[in-house]
Amino acid sequence: MFTQWSTPWLSLVGAMLLWVTRVEAAENPRHKREMQAIRAVVEENFRTSNNEDLAGCMATMTPYMPNREEFVSQLTEFFEDTDVYIRLVDLQFVSAEMADHGPAAVVRVTQQTITKGDEELPYSEFRTRSAMLPPWEVCEFDLVVHKIKGRWLVHKITGNVREAQLPEKQDEKQGSDSGR
């Protein structure tokens, strides 16, 4: 039934369907509203972190997030020991599903973390496994958010925090790569 040519065609059709689905989702008014709401809670999370507002930061997170007490302890220590500014660079939709607690989505966050002043950031275990203090100035990670009582809240980071580039630097790199 399948020939040697069918597999590449099926892959192409699947890729086209995925692209069409993403384009339709991006043009869907409800999708846009939900993404604006998710962006708003991530920006509020970053704003409260930048202001070292522990209660405000925790208010942007689900009450049942994993290891909540340990996170509060680490965040308190982070606010006492470190003075950084976190900026949301980009937020992209990855997926959505209906979870036990209601709607859930995964978004890809690109953030920039810079020190306030000339502070040198020391190595720590927390730094290597947290987006709060990544080893790179610009990083990306997948973030799970849950909608509870009509409001999106941060739940947890999934996967690895990885190095990223600012969009203008990506454009410069692509330009220099195409010049070869």
Image (cartoon, grey):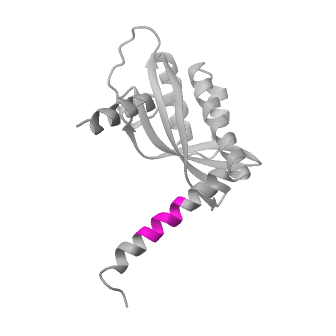
Q: Which residues are magenta?
A: 12-19
Q: Is residue 118 left or right of residue 110?
A: left
Any part of residue 62 in sight: no
- Which residue is drawn at the image coordinates 59% and 55% (left, top)? 23
Any part of residue 102 in sight: yes
Residue 56: percent from left, percent from top: 67, 27
Q: Is residue 147 left or right of residue 144?
A: right
Quadrant of residue 35 in the image?
top right
7 and 74: which one is in front? 7
- Residue 150 vertical placement versus 180 (above, below): below
- Which residue is drawn at the image coordinates 29% and 39% (left, top)? 178
- Which residue is drawn at the image coordinates 46% and 64% (left, top)? 15
Residue 18 in magenta stretch: yes
| Number of marks in picture | 0
Q: Give the quadrant of the C terminus.
A: top left
Q: Main secondary structure of the magenta part?
A: helix
Residue 111: percent from left, percent from top: 48, 31
- Residue 177 vertical placement versus 5 (above, below): above
171 and 63: which one is in front? 171
| Outermost residue to the bottom | 1
Residue 4: percent from left, percent from top: 29, 81
| Outermost residue to the right | 149
Residue 40: percent from left, percent from top: 67, 35
| Outermost residue to the front | 179
| Outermost residue to the top | 118
40 and 30: which one is in front? 30
147 and 40: which one is in front? 40
